[in-house]
Amino acid sequence: PVKRDDPLYVVGFPLGEPRTVHDNAFVYFPFRVTPEEYAEIKMLVSAEFDSIEAENASYREGKLKEFVDSYKLRDDGNGQSHYEYISQRFGDQPTIGADSDTYHGNSGSPVYNRRTHAVIGLLFDGQEDLTEPWAAGWRAHEAVLPITQVVQRLDEAAPDWREDPRACVLPAN
């Protein structure tokens, strides 16, 4: 699991170019957060829209609703609750929102935690390739499919996948 502001890097082949490491990436919207973390992130998202003029109030309200509707409250069965980012913007996909300075062609690239070098997900959607820098936030961020969800879906669809000799599975600690 990753937390907000955790450092990341992406390794891919953008724009048909040779392998590129996109470093200096960060988590903006973790897939799973506690109720306290959700409240903090919601305040940051609200602050992102505070500068919007009154005539754009419907845009602001729509984006805030999109945020609230994308973080789903879940009960883990032990009397604890958490929120999961199931993005409305990206087709109800489990999502980690990131700022990763990637380009067209990076889709499917592994996204790594810079501290542990563990794969945390697969990049599946990004911002338009622009010559001008953009500020990451709720309005603009890249989307990463959490690897925990990929493994969960593999376990459901093909329970024996870990036994396949072609699968590289690390032994449990």
Image (cartoon, helix red, strand yellow):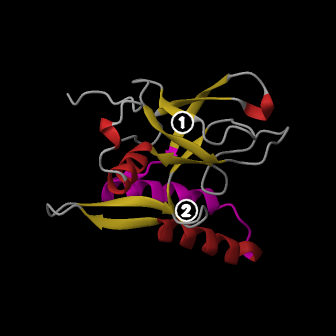
Q: How far from the left and from the top, in percent, is residue 4?
A: 45, 43
Helix, strand or loop at label 1? It is strand
Q: Residues within 10 Å of mark 2 (few under 14, many from 20)?
A: some
Which segment is the magenta one?
A: 28-54
Q: How many marks?
A: 2
Closer to the camera in the image, 89 or 35: 89
Q: CA distance from mark 2 to mark 1?
A: 20 Å
Which corner quadrant of the image does residue 18 belong to?
A: top right
**The stretch drawn in magenta includes residue 36:** yes
Residue 46, numbered circle: 2
Q: Quadrant of residue 2?
A: top left
Is 53 left, or right, of 47 in this rendering?
A: right
Q: Position of residue 85 (x, y in %)?
A: 45, 58
Considering the image in quadrants, where does the C terminus appear?
top left
What's the residue at 48%, 69% (across, down)? 68
Q: Based on the picture, tell me whether residue 162 belongs to the magenta stretch.
A: no
Q: Is residue 126 left or right of residue 45?
A: right
Q: Position of residue 90 (x, y in %)?
A: 60, 61
User: Which amino acid does the dot numbered 2 rest on?
Assistant: Ser
Does the residue at mark 2 contact the one at mark 1 (Cβ under 8 Å)? no
Q: Is residue 173 or residue 136 the one in the foreground?
A: 173
The residue located at (63%, 62%) in the rendering is: 49
Residue to which mark 1 is pinned: 26
- 152 above or below 21? below
Q: Residue at x 61, y 64 (%)?
A: 89
- Furthest-right residue in this view: 131
